[in-house]
């Protein structure tokens, strides 16, 4: 049962007991065989148990299809007002901007404070890579899930620049501007994501479907 | 050390073997169903369907207009109908989703009774197991409607079926199956005995959907124990002599 | 297994100093020449392990709520990936476990394993058996099918038979007047917690056994065999072989005969307004159900069923003969044989309707049960003690 590797290494076939390819006894073979078989069986037994933690087939199919697209009417939003809707289980903030707010988003004092003022990092579809980070300047639509560790930021203006509006995360204090752009030196590394969307008509936003970037989805952004 | 090494390689081998030998789960390919009206070129063999797959079609088009199958969800039928789109379409027609139970079409028991001569159509979730006579009864009863023999008078909404269990052959379920009422994509002719047998297969599946997988895994498990038992027996007999 | 310390084992045993002595104790544990019945303990350990793990995974999907319990079980069967395998391990496992348990206890009765110095092994085992019966009963309520509901209703109402406080106690235990959501939640917590309690009692049981060692079935034979073998490797392999056969039977049960023991009516949601045609318990609780039915008075039935279990607890003191093995005690052999037949009769009686035939058979079986333990064993052991006392001074094992 014991091997003497070092002594036998240079002369593999010199002596029976210490040869490089030892002649295993019947007992060793049977023991190793049963241990291997038993271990394999135990591992296989674990398969159904681990499998049961998977989500069910129909529920994954249902969640990707049934709630993928959602129409939101913005008729009730007066300029300056905002609302939160839930899309695919995520909070989505929709704001109706006043001309002042749109203007404030281009304020150089603000842009100087932002981590990614030009929206270069892919957190939005191409059609929202603009000064107001949205399809139409008067409507901003952002998924309010903090890019730091996933808390939900609430509305709160930037203290020094209140005009643009903004979001503030209560967990570790990340501050975003009114277009969901994160300020420099905040715990959150990226801007708030923009969902795929387009306007069905002037008062209806369809979330979950982008006409101009059909391949844009939350799987393709830098970080949710 | 030697032991450990052989253990590891043995385990790796066997796990990979046993994993691949497990039957693959029904793949969720979502191609929409091909409309069946286009007559296929005759040379090409039609894709074969399992009886329970045809049975699902019959259930969808016939039985479910009166019966519920409340323990099952629309989405559970993915084992027989791999197209999520088709299932979703079916569910939506009935104002439900993939994750809703296949409910009774009647708003209340009273309405269900009123529509069926006073008997409420029973839930079909486990009917193959719970009804007296089991699947054989269901198969024969569905094909068991006969013309009314002379001397027997039937109340309105009552049908003559000598196989049926209730009301002494004066059955309250109107004959559900008619020759050629369904076009099966695999070309099977929709005769009444054929449909009765297919829909029974479906009801058995609905009651116990894992039957074939269960037998497959069971066989694999028994083979495994035969192998392990053989090795252990050899080792035991060896040790009996020596240790 | 290797005795000289190699660096790789040294690291762990320096840091966990008890590990080496423990392994050595287990490996070298001297085993008398025991027969195949002594492998049932190992089968029980494995069966319990499977019950425990499958139970944990089932409780991840089960909802102990009146309106959701039944559906959550249907979801496990239909939707949870591999859920049906896990559930069949758990539901089939009960029967396998109880079968092994009763054989294990039967082994103890036949070979006199309950005697000094193994009283604590016996008592801890019996205590565990009571825990198992409670756990199984509580677990059977959880799916909230017709049989769950009505079985639980019938058994909990046995509590009402206790004079004076019966009804109050029942309402206290159920948390409301009838079996409902509160009781279901209690049954779930009871069932879940008992698994952990049993796990510790199993530890205690094996600990007690390792104090005294296994008994030697050959001692009373004309040619006693005093040789022992270390537990490893021979008995390890023997136990593994038995477990292998046990698990193969387990697999046949759950993969090929799942309906053999299942009750039809439990796939129907509990309906408090409609009692199913015949309420019968699962086979492993049937003997005591038969006893409840065999005695016309409710209280009497309750007392008889409880006494049938309690009498097992005092067995070590009822039978104080130095002889262990029933094979070599003609009267005890006949008595134990009768007892086993009586036990099987009671199982069958409990699973059949209460026809006069079965009721009288149960009464006969109960009579055998009490006569064997309360009369036959004390009398024969008294005689045997007198005989051995005169010839040799009592030998113990
Ligand atoms: C799940 C429950 C149980 C487990 C896991 C278990 C486990 C074991 C194990 C591993 C052994 C040593 C191997 C053997 O002798 O078979 C043993 C021995 C024993 N058990 Fe159990 N046991 C259980 C239930 C019981 C019950 C219910 C009783 C009695 C009412 C009992 C009484 C005994 C006795 C008396 C011995 C010593 C046998 C002898 O050496 O003569 N056990 N048990
Ligand atoms: S999660 Fe928002 S700042 Fe940390």
Image (tube, coloured by chain):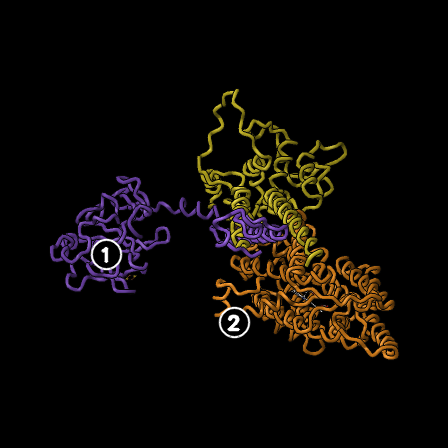
Chain colours: A purple, B yellow, C orange
Cα separation between marks 2 and 1: 69 Å
Picture quadrant of residue A185:
bottom left
Q: Quadrant of the N terminus of chain A?
A: bottom right
Disc 2 vs disc 1: Cβ atoms closer than 8 Å? no
Looking at the picture, how far across and down is residue C181, in whole percent?
A: 56, 64
Chain under disc 1:
A
* SS type, badge 2: loop
* SS type, badge 1: loop
Q: Residues within 10 Å of mark 2 (few under 14, many from 20)?
A: few
Q: Is residue C263 above or below residue B35?
A: below
Q: Which mark is residue B30?
A: none
Task: Determine if residue A129 is in view.
Answer: yes
Disc 1 marks which residue? A81
Quadrant of the rendered image holding ligand 2: bottom left
Question: Relative to B135, is C20 on the left or the right?
Answer: left
Disc 2 marks which residue? C17
Q: Nearer the viewer, mark 2 or mark 1?
A: 2
């Amino acid at each position: 049962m014991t091997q003497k590797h070092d002594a036998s290494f240079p002369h593999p076939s010199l002596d029976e007991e210490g040869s490089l390819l030892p002649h295993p006894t019947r007992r060793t073979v049977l023991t190793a065989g049963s241990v291997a078989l038993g271990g394999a069986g135990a591992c296989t037994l674990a398969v159904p148990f681990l499998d049961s933690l998977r989500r069910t087939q129909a529920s994954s199919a249902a969640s990707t299809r049934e709630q993928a697209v959602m129409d939101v009417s913005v008729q009730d939003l007066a300029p300056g007002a905002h609302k939160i809707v839930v899309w695919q289980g995520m909070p989505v903030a929709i704001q109706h901007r006043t001309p002042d707010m749109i203007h404030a988003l281009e304020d150089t004092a603000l842009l100087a404070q932002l981590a990614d003022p030009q929206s270069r990092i892919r957190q939005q579809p191409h059609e929202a890579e603009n000064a107001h980070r949205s399809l139409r300047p008067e409507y901003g639509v952002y998924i309010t899930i903090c890019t730091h560790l996933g808390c939900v930021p609430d509305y709160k203006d930037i203290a020094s620049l209140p005009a643009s509006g903004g979001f503030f995360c209560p967990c570790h204090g990340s501050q975003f501007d009114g277009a969901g752009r994160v300020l420099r030196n905040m715990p959150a590394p990226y801007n708030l994501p923009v969902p795929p969307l387009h306007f069905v008509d002037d008062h209806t936003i369809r979330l979950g479907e982008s006409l101009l970037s059909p391949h844009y989805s939350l799987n393709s952004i830098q970080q949710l | 050390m030697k032991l450990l090494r052989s253990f590891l390689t043995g385990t790796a081998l066997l796990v990979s073997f046993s994993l691949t030998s497990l039957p693959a789960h029904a793949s969720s390919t979502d191609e929409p169903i091909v409309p069946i009206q286009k007559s296929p070129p005759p040379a090409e063999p039609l894709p074969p369907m399992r009886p329970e797959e045809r049975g699902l079609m019959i259930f969808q088009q016939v039985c479910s207009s009166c019966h519920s199958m409340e323990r099952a969800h629309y989405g559970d039928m993915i084992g027989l109908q791999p197209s999520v789109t088709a299932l979703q379409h079916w569910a939506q027609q009935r104002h439900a989703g993939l994750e809703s139970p296949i409910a009774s079409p009647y708003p209340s028991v009273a309405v269900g009774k009123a529509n069926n001569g006073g008997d409420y159509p029973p839930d079909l979730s486990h009917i193959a197991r719970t009804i007296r006579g089991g699947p054989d009864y269901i198969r024969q009863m569905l094909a068991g409607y006969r013309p009314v023999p002379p001397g027997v008078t039937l109340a309105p909404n009552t049908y003559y079926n000598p196989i049926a269990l209730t009301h002494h052959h004066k059955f309250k379920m109107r004959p559900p199956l008619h020759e050629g009422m369904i076009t099966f994509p695999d070309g099977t002719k929709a005769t009444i005995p054929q449909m009765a047998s297919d829909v029974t297969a479906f009801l058995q599946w609905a009651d116990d959907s894992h039957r074939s997988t269960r037998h497959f895994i069971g066989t694999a498990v028994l083979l495994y124990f035969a192998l392990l038992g053989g090795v252990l027996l050899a080792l035991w007999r060896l040790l009996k002599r020596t240790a | 297994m290797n005795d000289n310390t190699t660096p790789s084992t040294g690291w762990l045993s320096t840091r966990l100093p008890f590990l080496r002595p423990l392994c050595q104790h287990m490996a070298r544990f001297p085993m008398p020449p025991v027969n195949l019945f002594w492998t049932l303990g190992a089968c029980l350990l494995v069966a319990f392990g499977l019950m425990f793990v499958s139970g944990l995974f089932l409780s991840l999907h089960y909802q102990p709520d009146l309106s959701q319990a039944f559906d959550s079980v249907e979801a496990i069967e239909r939707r949870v990936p591999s859920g049906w395998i896990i559930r069949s391990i758990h539901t089939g496992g009960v029967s396998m476990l109880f079968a092994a348990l009763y054989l294990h206890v039967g082994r103890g009765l036949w070979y006199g394993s309950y005697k000094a110095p193994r009283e604590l092994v016996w008592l801890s085992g019996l205590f565990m058996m009571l825990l198992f019966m409670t756990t199984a009963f509580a677990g059977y309520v959880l799916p909230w099918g017709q049989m769950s509901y009505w079985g639980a209703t019938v058994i909990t109402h046995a509590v009402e038979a206790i004079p004076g406080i019966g009804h109050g106690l029942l309402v206290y235990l159920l948390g409301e007047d009838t079996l409902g959501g509160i009781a279901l939640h209690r049954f779930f917590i009871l069932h879940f917690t008992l698994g952990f309690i049993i796990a510790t009692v199993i530890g205690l049981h094996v600990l007690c056994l390792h104090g005294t060692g296994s008994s030697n079935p050959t001692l009373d034979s004309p040619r006693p065999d005093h040789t022992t073998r270390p537990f490893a490797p021979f008995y390890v392999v023997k136990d593994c072989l038995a477990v292998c056969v046990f698990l193969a039977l387990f697999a046949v049960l759950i993969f090929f005969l799942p309906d053999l023991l299942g009750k039809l009516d439990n796939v129907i949601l509990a309906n408090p307004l409609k009692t199913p045609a015949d309420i019968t318990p699962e086979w492993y609780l049937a003997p005591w159900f038969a006893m409840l039915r065999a005695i016309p008075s409710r209280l009497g039935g309750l007392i008889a069923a409880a006494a049938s279990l309690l009498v097992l607890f005092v067995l070590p003191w009822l039978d104080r003969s130095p002889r262990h093995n029933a094979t070599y005690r003609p009267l005890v052999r006949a008595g134990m044989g009768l007892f086993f037949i009586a036990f099987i009769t009671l199982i069958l009686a409990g699973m059949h309707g209460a026809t006069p035939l079965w009721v009288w058979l149960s009464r006969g079986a109960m009579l055998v049960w009490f006569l064997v333990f309360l009369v036959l064993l004390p009398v024969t052991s008294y005689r045997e003690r007198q005989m051995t006392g005169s010839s040799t001074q009592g030998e113990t094992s």
